[in-house]
Image (spheres, rainbow, N blue to C red):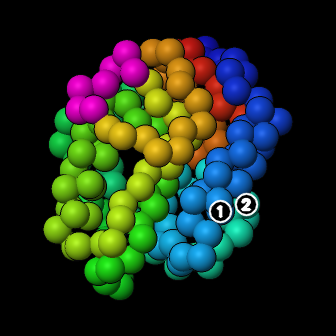
Amino acid sequence: MSSVDVFISKEQIANRVKEIGALISKDYAGKEVTVIPLLTGAFMFAADLLREIKVPVDIQFMATSSYEGTQSTGEVKINYDLKRSVHGKHVLLVEDIVDTGTTLKTVMEIMKTRKPASIKLASLLYKPARNIHPVDIDYLGFEIEDKFVIGYGLDFDGRYRELPYIGVYQA
Ligand code: IMP
């Protein structure tokens, strides 16, 4: 029987998202920002974060996948790509979690070839213990230990994304 323990509560997430939104609003004051949530995992974080960003935003989506169950395949697939050019735009990528860093390394490389004015990254979570490719996270929610987490957008085989908190999955 599997169970879910609350790891980061709904309130803790909401407070941190507000803080990050305020920082982003300050850093991009007077500019427009192209916010790119990386689907699927970042959808909930992005939806809440966007409501805390007080500068004009242009929203585009990109969908990546690299996981099967709780294992990273090490191969990143772009399943859905941007529909409009980001040339000369201020891009803010929004990710759920940086784990090995493989996804972000790949996405950053692709994004740079499209010549935006700037690229920054907001990630809700970072698991340093498993990092292989160092990634600069400009706006980080929480650094966590090496546990497989679910909820608030994160899944285990497509399940648990709807949970309003972040939990630890115990098989
Ligand atoms: P990376 O490419 O290894 O950095 O992994 C990034 C992606 O793997 C994230 O966007 C998640 O979709 C998934 N992932 C990594 N760790 C977890 C976890 O603990 N729970 C759920 N998904 C995870």
Q: Is residue 74 above or below residue 34?
A: above
- Left or right for 39, reference 166: left
171 vs 82: above or below: above
The residue identified by callout 1 is 25
Q: Residue 116: image x %, image y %?
A: 30, 72
Q: Quadrant of residue 27?
A: bottom right
Residue 38, located in which quarter of the rendered image?
bottom left
Residue type at tag 2:
Glu
Q: Please report whichever mark, 2 or 1, sits nearer to the chain's N-terminal start.
A: 1
Residue occupying image coordinates x 61% and y 14%: 1
Q: Is residue 142 visible?
A: yes
Secondary structure found at label 2:
loop
Q: Residues within 10 Å of mark 2 (few under 14, many from 20)?
A: some
Q: Is residue 103 left or right of residue 75?
A: right
Q: Please state the extent of the stretch shown in magenta in the rendering.
A: 128-134
Question: Which residue type carries mark 1?
Answer: Ser
> Which quadrant holds residue 149?
top right
